[in-house]
Amino acid sequence: MEKHLLEQYLADHHREAYLWARQCCRYDDEQAKDVLQAACLKIWEGRAHYNNQSSFRTWLFAVIRYTALDSLREKHPAIVDEPGDHLGLHADEPPEEPVDYEALLQQLPARQAQVLLLAFYHNMTLEAIATVMDISLGTVRTHYDRGKKQLKELLSRTRVQDHGRR
Amino acid sequence: MEDDKILESFFDGMKQADAQRPVPPLEKPTPVRRLWSPGIRYSAAAAVTIFLVAVLYTVRKRAQEPTAQTRDVVIEVGQRSTPTGSLVDMPEQTLSEWTSPTSSLSEDF
């Protein structure tokens, strides 16, 4: 892909790329900036090569996800597979805010949260999510169903607490 | 479907919250300028490796060659000197001239 086209695509998807980087970095703004910069540099230098097998957006999200994973592993060597699996909050600890979106999502296993974010927040198809996450479609479906179920439970619990406070 | 509505409204709320979030500007990455292109660097590395292998081969080959022929050792054998060689000059005397060194003792006696 030519440089000016690449630059144009990156500019077009910059905002959602940053938000996705932030979601991959457990909502850490500074780390998200670094990850996005590193991902752009990879693309710019040709270390990440777009091969037209998926949409540019899907491919960009996959590059960002891998870069975020590398960055998190550098900071937290205990992370082997996915960010958030070992460092997230426990489901028994409800968030303090009535609706704290990020804290609620952090209570889910990282893969489930990412699948839900890609599906509902970024409006991606399950096939595209499988490409971004580099997992099979069946695994995406499993994470999707389990994630939805868990998030609904968390939301209902939050609402009950919210009503209880009032 | 009803359940998905709940989740959709949750993520819509999240999107609205993120809509006010400042996004850092896209900075055009400045690739690091390198003096030599990767092709030249790889070629140079290959050339150095080949040179070192050649040097090592030559050195080992020379070490395996037979060593230079030894020079002939010449041993000169001369006349053997007297084992009791002395620097004292002993004058030769004839028997008629010879006097006993102890003759004075017999004379005294």
Image (tube, rainbow, N blue to C red):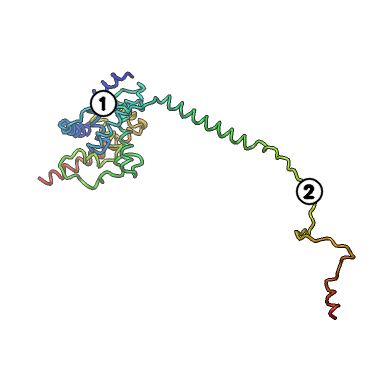
Task: Answer with the quarter of the image where residue B8 lies.
Answer: top left
- Residue ranking furthest to the left: A166
Look at mark 2 in the image and give the residue it sits on: B78
Residue lying at 32% horizontally and 33% vertically, measured from the top left: A67
Seen in the picture, residue B97 relative to B82 is either above or below; the reply is below
Q: Front-most of B46 and A11?
A: B46
Q: Front-most of B38 and A134?
A: B38
Which chain letter goes with mark 2? B
Marked residue nearer the N-terminal end (1 or 2): 1
Residue lying at 56% horizontally and 31% vertically, measured from the top left: B54
Q: Front-most of A73 and B69?
A: B69
Q: Give the SS element for disc 1.
A: loop
Residue lying at 36% horizontally and 31% vertically, measured from the top left: A134
Q: Provide residue A30's location: percent of width, then percent of height.
A: 23, 37
Residue lying at 31% horizontally and 25% vertically, measured from the top left: A44
Q: Amino acid at mark 2?
A: Gly
Seen in the picture, residue A32 relative to A6 is either above or below; the reply is below
Look at mark 1 in the image and give the residue it sits on: B28
Q: Amino acid at mark 1?
A: Lys
